[in-house]
Amino acid sequence: MQSLEILGDRQALLTNKLLRMRETLREDISIEMLRRIADDFEKVYSEMAALLTKEQREASHEEFTKFEKMHNDNRANDFIAVLQCFSSRRGIPNDIHSDNATTFVAPVPSYGDAKLGRLERYQHIQLMHQNFWRIPSPFARSPEVEHKCELELQEIDIDTETDETDCEAIIDLEDNESNAESLETISVNGIGGDDEMTLEIRYEAVLAEMTWVERAQTLATLQALVARHPGRAQQLHAKLSSPSRRRSLHETLKKYQAKQTRALEKRQALQKEKAQKIQQLLTRVEDVKTAKQQLIEKKRMRMEERLQRAAENRSQYLKDKIKKAHDEEEKLKEIAFIKNIEAQNKRLDFIESCKEQEGRLQDLETERQKRAEEKAAKEAAVERRRQEIEQERQKKLQIMSENRREREKRVGKMQEQKERQRQALAREKARDREERLLALQAQQQATTEELQRKIIQKQQESARRHEEHIEDIRQRAVELTIPTRNCDETNSNKQETDDNLSVSDKGKDSGNGKANKKKLKKLRLRMAQAAEEYTAELQPLAPQIRKQSQVPKLLNTIVKGGGPLGVERPLGQLLRLMAKAEVVDFQSMWLLDGLKIISDVIQQGMEPNSEISKRAVVISVQLYRNACSLCPQISRHAILGNTITVLLDALLISLKTPEEKCPLYPVELSTELILACTVALSPTNSLKQTHPKVVERLPDLISYTVSLGLLDTLVRKFTKIQESVETQQSLVLSLLASLGLLTKLAELCPKGPDITKFLATVKSTELFGSVSLLYAAIVPIGECIPPRTISLAAATFNLLVTLANLDIVTFQDVLSEENLSFKFLDVVSILLQYCVPKSEEKGETQAVIIDLIATLGFFCANNKINQNLLTSDHSSVIIKSLTKLPKQFDMVIYPTLVTVIYENPEAKAILSKDFDIASLEEYSKSDLAKKNRIVSLLTKAE
């Protein structure tokens, strides 16, 4: 069932259609268009009436009555407008107005009146079409269908008759039957239609001599006069209540059969009249065909006469042509004779000239033969001399080749002897090396088997004790894995972190601000002088390389500038060229100081209101990174040429300036700069031995990074993380890049006295805030850690291991703070619970486990407080998780466990419940332990 809202929308659409049809009613449209518009009006109003459902009729009687009145008024006005246009086109006076419009347009049946059925509405529409527009009704039906419909309606009236409805139906049927043939306009809407029909029959003699308009006006006036005469209601009641109005079904059928008989006679008469008209029309057609045939025959005769006259004229014209041609032929013969004589004379003259030319050619040929014979004699003499010289040269070559063969034989014999000696020595060395390797392998295999045997034996002995306490251990492990930090503690931690940062910032700004500026100036000046000395020592680019490579041309284009596009295009070409560059391209980039040009573009692009676009800056950073990653020489040049400081300055500016997210640049500019700096520093370790100046420049570079405040800016970025970052891809990438840069700086920082202030920064920032970062990112998630967070954990523990290798004292001092140590152990316990079940999977999970265990070893090395903290009940989950790791991690776990129990009997007693202490002591005395970095810290302390 349709809802009221859908019906309201459909009614609105029909109303819009009515408005468009009203706009098309104008004086200059055709009668056929008027008929189509009239049919469209009828269809639209019928559809609007059909939209009124039963629910709408019963919902609100007042609203339905109001809509019905408005519907009828609009319909009458539209039909009057169509009639006015129609009368103006047919010459009918256009003086129809609303007072007498009821005569021309029948009143619309009330769709809410239960007394009117389909027959009354159908008759109303059909009469309106036939009497006023003379248009075939779209609802017209065949007599049989109409009769069937009327019988159905009559049966319904008989079955459901009442005193009032039955009388009204009978009166309407009688009036329609007796007056349908003589009325021009009729209304079937209640009692008013019967009165009008009676007036027209009563005054038929008077109305017959009037025009159509006068007839309608007179009927309207008479109806107004007799509408309310006294006693009319009683007469009508008596008439309607008369028993004679009731009819049986047989009488009704008989009446309709008579009506159909009369209609059939009228149709037959109409068909006869149409047949006569068609016969007359055919006669006229035959007459027209005969006249047309005569006209065609006359035209043919005229055409034949014209053709005959044309043939006579053509024959006369040809005769004249033939006569004129005969005279011209005689003249042509005379001209041909004269030309023949002249041609013969010319032929004779040509023959004589040819004979003279042949004589001269024979003389020239004789002279040429003489010269050729002389030239051949000279060439023969030259050839003989050349052959003599060639024979002498061949003799000399043979002597030289014999000498060379003898020398090669002597050299070959000497080389064979040396090769045999070398091979004998090599076989001897290989045999010795294989013997030593086999001995070492056998010894290592025996040691490993012995350790495994002892471990298995001890594990079997402790299995019984382990089974007794397994339930208690599981319960405590579950309780300890759930973080129990409340809101107050979290807020206090945040407040303490913010206070520490604010205090450190204030102290740095007030106490060290001027000192840092002076130090930066000195460092920049010293590094600039060293870069100038380095660039002065560079060799100029060879002309051959300049011709073979496109890099010089593109660098010159960048230097010239030319607006944003003038810089972006060559930078893009260089970026694509570096991906498939050859040696000459790398040499050009190095010797022409291409990194300096690229860094100048980055520096200018970071300035406010710069002409260089952000796209050009991003492409420059990517080009800088690719060049350094593909060529170690260029990476070393980035440090020695001092171009990396430009990237560090640009990185500090980008970190302090908020960046707008753009789909064209999914990676932030600060992240690109961090990656470029990390790549530029990556191959430095392998180049320390090849270029000593790199080692001299690294302390100044690290001091410059610390004094610039870049490390503090990165730490502030870490401290802002207070929730999981799994869904923030760009932030995770930025954090990973920042951790990678800090790890690289820690690797390059020289050990010993802290001249670069790098370790002081590590201590003041609590290991760069890495532990707090992991705590904020992992603890809210729990044990189900997503992949990006695992990557973040791997990078963080790699940084922690690097810092511990750099200075273990600073590392342990920072983690000795109670709040930070608890955060560290919570993070370690959660990561172990997640990573241990997936330890067999190769990837970042294994890297996290290895670095995490190494970090625990550095945490406990020579530190009894940290040893007791790790073996306490709060951290017992960590020890239990380490027992679940497979045997392939034994070489990683053993050094850490050795540091945990070193000179600590209490920790040894606690650890003996889960591990074989004897196997750990044996491992600590083995050669593998001596080579281990963590265990070596214990021996140094001794």
Image (cartoon, rainbow, N blue to C red):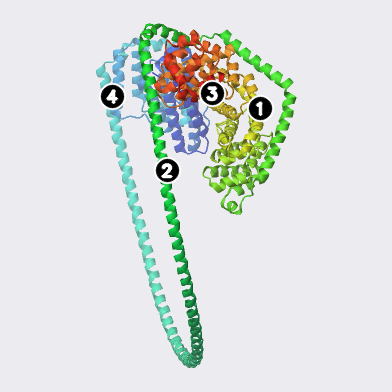
Q: Which residue is mark 2?
A: 426
C-alpha distance separating marks 2 and 3:
42 Å
Sequence order check: which comes first, mark 4 or mark 1? Answer: 4
C-alpha distance separating marks 4 and 1:
112 Å
Is 407 drawn above or below residue 204 in the view shown?
below
Label 2 neighbour load within 10 Å: few <14, some 14-19, many 20+: few
Q: Which residue is mark 3?
A: 801
C-alpha distance separating marks 2 and 4:
122 Å
Question: Which circle, 2 or 1, is nearer the viewer?
Answer: 2
Sequence order check: which comes first, mark 2 or mark 4? Answer: 4
Residue at image coords 42%, 76%:
313
Residue at image coords 41%, 76%:
314
Label 1 neighbour load within 10 Å: few <14, some 14-19, many 20+: many
Tag 4 near tag 3, CB within 8 Å: no
Q: Which residue is mark 1?
A: 756
C-alpha distance separating marks 1 and 3:
20 Å
Query: What amino acid does circle 3 point to?
Result: Val
The x and y percentages for residue 266 are 30, 33
Q: Secondary structure at mark 3?
A: helix
Question: Which circle, 2 or 4, is nearer the viewer?
Answer: 2
Q: Which residue is mark 4?
A: 148
Query: What amino acid does circle 1 point to?
Result: Thr
The x and y percentages for residue 77 are 50, 26
The x and y percentages for residue 148 are 28, 24
